[in-house]
Amino acid sequence: MREPAEARRRRILAVVQSRGSARVRDLAAELEVSVVTVRRDVEELARRGALRRGHGVVRPVVPVERTARPAAPYGRGDAVAVVVPERHAYLQETLHGARGVLEEAGIRIALHIAPQAAGAERPIVESALAGGARGLLIAPRWRGADEEDADARWLAETGVPTVLMERRPDRGGPLHAVDSVCSDHRYGVHLAVDHLVALGHRRILLAARDDSPTARAVRSAFARIAADRPEIEDWCVVLSAPATAPGRGAARPAPLDLAALLRERRATGALLHGDVDALMLVQQLADAGVRVPRDCSVVAYDDVVAALGSVPLTAVAPPKAEVGRAAAELLLRRLAFEHGTATVPEAVRRIELLPELKVRGSAQAPPAGGPLTDSRSASA
């Protein structure tokens, strides 16, 4: 139901009297009506002598004492830019977490989807800031370390409060003084490996992507953790799919034959990153006659769609929505200082949130007959 004109005009008058001035376009955003509607309301209030009009600005008839401050600490109606990669369901959940916090605070979100091309985020951010965005939440794609290095300096100099989501700045690098919130992926990998080892698996492999900071963190963590676990007799890290490598122009690796690799390594457990690749690889195993979990136990990493497969997959679930919420809360603190409602700036924060393991039955004790073997690997 539309708000009656007189009720809307009373709200306009209350805002102007409490703040000392207000821009017409900000009033329109706060009231969720068109600029034309607000202009008409302002004209009517000015005709009655209730306020004074300026060029795009409205002021009360009696000047407000400068000690009176806006009721809202963040500049309600302000917009912040949120930049996430296209076709990235993981970060879409992070976006939803941030959205709830910002909208509750009266902050308008300007969502920007960055295409997969290298360097795509910079022009998007520059355009958003030129359009008036007061802050930035961003999850750069960073398919490789070179892209991360190229983006670090300009991101550190945006000139507005900025928070990185699911990205961990290098210590001492250009982004060392930028707030960030991410999942503790080392702990997530620990949960997966510990689950498999506790079930009795001693030969484990990781098939993972290699085209994002999360993927690289998972690969690195698995190598360190597996090497440090004395119970693990053999482990390896392979690319989950050719398209998940960041390199361009190089020879593309052959598609992963997971069933053959399991037999070659005599492995009984696998950690698969990310979810979509995990579901496809599990189907590949089924086509090759390898049953999950009877012949091979599987743990997925991401838990976006892992539960939806024909075999619901046990999965490491990073706190995706919580990352977005925490990032948005950090940004609000920065905006409060910018608006003068916080007198002391917040310390720069690097927040890590712990993933959890969702057990669904795709992992069990190794098969009684021992690791998978075939004629090619019997002597391995």
Image: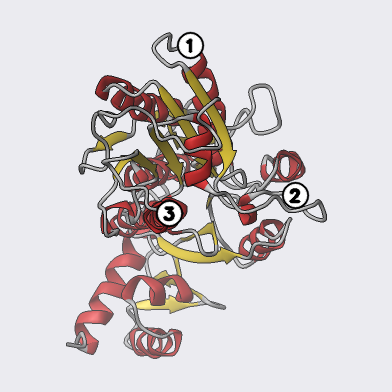
Q: CA distance from mark 1 to mark 2?
A: 30 Å
Q: Give the number of the disc on residue 282.
A: none
The picture quadrant where one finds residue 200 is: top left
- Residue 151, percent across and down? 72, 45
Find residue 215 and report its horizontal and vertical position in percent.
Answer: 54, 40
In the image, what residue type sits under mark 1? Asp
Q: Is residue 42 above or below residue 111?
A: below
Q: Identify residue for label 1.
A: 228
Quick one: which residue is furthest to the left in this view? 1
Q: Quadrant of the N terminus?
A: bottom left
Name the N-terminal-most of marks 3 and 1: 1
Q: Secondary structure at mark 3?
A: loop
Q: Residues within 10 Å of mark 2 (few under 14, many from 20)?
A: few
Q: Residue at x 43, y 54 (%)?
A: 288
Mark 3: amino acid: Ala
Vertical position of residue 232 compared to residue 1: above or below: above
- SS assignment at label 1: helix
Q: Is residue 242 left or right of residue 88?
A: right
